[in-house]
Image (tube, helix red, strand yellow):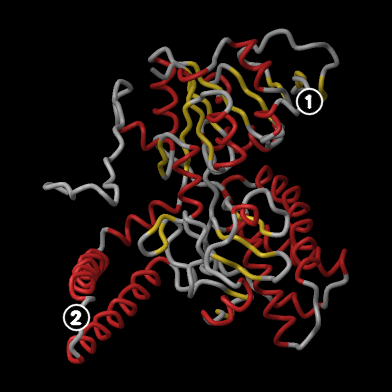
Amino acid sequence: EVEVYGFDYDYTLASYKKGVEYLIHDIARENLVSQYGYPHGIGKIVYDPQFAIRGLHYDVEKGLFLKVDSSHQIQLGTVHRGRDKLTDKEVLSLYKRRQLPVTMLESNKKMVQLVDIFSQPEMSLIAGLTDYFQSHKLEYEPESLYQDVAKSIGTAHATFHSETRANPKLYLHKDSELIPYLTMLQKSGKKIFLITNSPFETVNAGMSYKVGESWRELFDVIIVQAGKPHFFTNNSKSFRELEVDKNVFLWDTVTQLEKGKIYAGGKIDDFQKLTGWMGGKVMYFGDHPYTDLADATLHHGWRTGAVIRELELELDKMNSEEFKWGVNWQQVLMALIDENQSETEEESKLILEEWKEEMRILQDGLKSMFNPHFGSTFRTQNNPTFFSRKLFRFSDIYTSRVTNLHKYPLNSSFYPRRGVLPHEFKSWFV
């Protein structure tokens, strides 16, 4: 059904090395000292790539990191002020209940969700600053701290772009499957486009390194500085053609999107009108479920694919014998507790408490296999995370890299796994 394939650039076609996260963190940290007057002592704060996971919520007023599940429940044991974990009693005292109202989680400037890879340096820096202020007994305003860090991270992106343009080999991974995959799509008669918020100079340097100087020949339409998510809500600027040699935008109206030319800005309605590409025959890949995918699928009917690099690490952990044994034994313990919870004899009650304690220890161990502070990006013990819920809603498929699809013929279909509802019987086979 898919005739047109579209791609974002950052963390979709371009896969960055960890050095990018260190770079963004350190530039933002120095900016806090030079532009906002933060103490010079914060210069010793080091980026910790193991601290946070994608999809966490940050309570701007309380200065807390929270992991929330698909039912809006706080996962106890994962709430942190900086790197200090709060007790369950402290969490319930602050929020009064585990289940947060939807108004607190959706479109709320006081409770932000950090959902892309670029958010990880931001979260690490917030945690480092919080620890610094608390250890030095300095009073601070969590809301101001968050705003200062967010602005400094934004400033760091400009330097990040110039650094990656100057030395793409230092910051970009090469994917040997990318050229064959795009070539296969082209030879199969598929249309290919690129829509990214990045400037042309950044995209050109990166794609020239990854694909070669003639990379533009693989794309039918190239749009830079698109201003997503506004591109998908028709609140962006009109299309402008970029004269590449002079790096200037031409004044005249864009009446067609031509292969080989570079365009900036634009709106999805104009894009669909000029190309005729719309609905389910278009599939667009991006790494950000909200900015890249939500409006494209909910309002315009595009197929969507999410690129989530963390999948590879999580799958490695999930395929280990230790994890498989732990999950299976947890299911056994849960079944034993469920079947025997009505027992009234004292000895039986003691055994039940021993099983519950064993299960708590087992669950903590399984969580720590992914991340010692927050566990898996995709699961909170028995429920999907809030991030997973959005991911499943806004993407038709998700994968760790777009070139994974090169392993499948273009006429392949992906079928969803049938989940068991609470009132249904369990499958004989699964």
278 versus 104 height, above or below: above
96 versus 166 height, above or below: below
Q: CA distance from mark 2 to mark 1?
A: 67 Å
Badge 2: residue crowd in 10 Å (few <14, some 14–19, many ≥20): few
Residue 109: x percent and y percent?
73, 54
69 on left or right of 240: left
Between 393 and 26, which is closer to the camera in this rendering?
Answer: 393
Residue at x-position 63% and y-position 61%: 121
Q: Please, what is the three-letter code of the amino acid marked with disc 2?
A: Glu
Residue 354: x percent and y percent?
25, 86
Q: Which quarter of the figure has residue 298?
A: top right
The number of numbered badges drawn on the structure is: 2
Residue at x-position 61% and y-position 13%: 259
123 on left or right of 418: right
Q: Which quarter of the figure has residue 346?
A: bottom left
419 on left or right of 269: left
What element does badge 2 sit on?
Answer: loop
Q: Which residue is mark 1?
A: 237
Asked whether the beta carbons under mark 2 and mark 1 sit within 8 Å of each other, the answer is: no
What element does badge 1 sit on?
Answer: loop
Q: Please, what is the three-letter code of the amino acid marked with disc 1?
A: Lys
Give the quarter of the figure containing the N terminus.
top left
Residue at x-position 67% and y-position 68%: 125
Q: Residue furthest bottom?
A: 346
Residue 409: x percent and y percent?
29, 25
Could you tell which of marks 2 and 1 lies nearer the N-terminus? 1
Q: Which residue is mark 2?
A: 343
Residue at x-position 69% and y-position 71%: 63
